Amino acid sequence: MSRLATGIDVLDRQLDGGIPAGSVVLLAADPASQSELFLYELTTTRGTLWLTTLRSDVAVEDALDRCPGATGSPTIRDVGGDAPLDAANKLVRDLPEGANLIVDVVDTLERNEGPRYRKFLNALQTHMVNTRGLTVLHGLKGETVPENRDLTEHMADIVFDLETKIDGSEIENRLAVPKFRGGRALDETIKLRLAERVTVDTSRDIA
């Protein structure tokens, strides 16, 4: 099975070379975290369509320009209007072979009726398999998680769960991969540093 790089070397090594082509990934993270760095790294790997549902396309482009680490040049489209699911579905159908798709954030789409959202996810998965592309759905954790988040987690082939917490004077980021359909989920979390880029935190835990 061919693997697609995420742009994050340590993660690709842990996943035996990357993510299987044709996969849909959920990246779940706290709103007050550096999870967008994962999306920025992904844009460096191949052509990327970035669908933004909350921020404007100008805001996303500006954030990419100001990012101190390397980024690609994704095509950015704002689908946060009156019919975000319809707009996203139309753009997904036109994705070329081997492309990345980023949905940032998927929460807006999850707030549609369950059957409509399920139909979108099924069409998305079919298109990814047919084009051997890669989708990352950026979902926010917190008190206002949409009801359809369970559906996203079930339909996703892979789940990345980023936990960010403040421990005294330290900000600790740990990435769990509890689900990896057709592959090997990680039995331990990865401690990361999320600064200019996504790197491994080599500091030792002090009991």
Image (cartoon, helix red, strand yellow):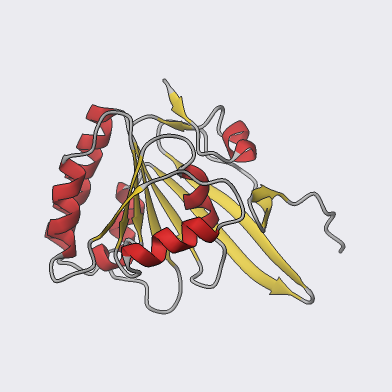
Pick the residue in front: 77 or 13: 77
**Residue 34 location in percent, x, y?**
57, 63
Pick the residue in front: 29 or 206: 29
Q: Horizontally, is 87 left or right of 157 in the view?
A: left
Q: Residue at x 54, y 55 (%)?
A: 37
On the rendered image, what quadrant is the C terminus found in? Answer: bottom right
Relative vertical location of residue 46 with respect to residue 108 in this rendering, above or below: above
Q: Horizontally, is 38 left or right of 109 in the view?
A: right
Q: Residue at x 25, y 29 (%)?
A: 131
Residue furthest toward the top?
1
**Residue 188 location in percent, x, y?**
65, 46
Pick the residue in front: 50 or 16: 50
Q: Residue at x 22, y 49 (%)?
A: 121
On the rendered image, what quadrant is the N terminus found in? Answer: top left
**Residue 46 location in percent, x, y?**
42, 34
Q: Horizontally, is 188 left or right of 129 in the view?
A: right
**Could you say which quadrant of the image residue 150 lies in?**
bottom left
Q: Horizontally, is 61 left or right of 83 in the view?
A: right
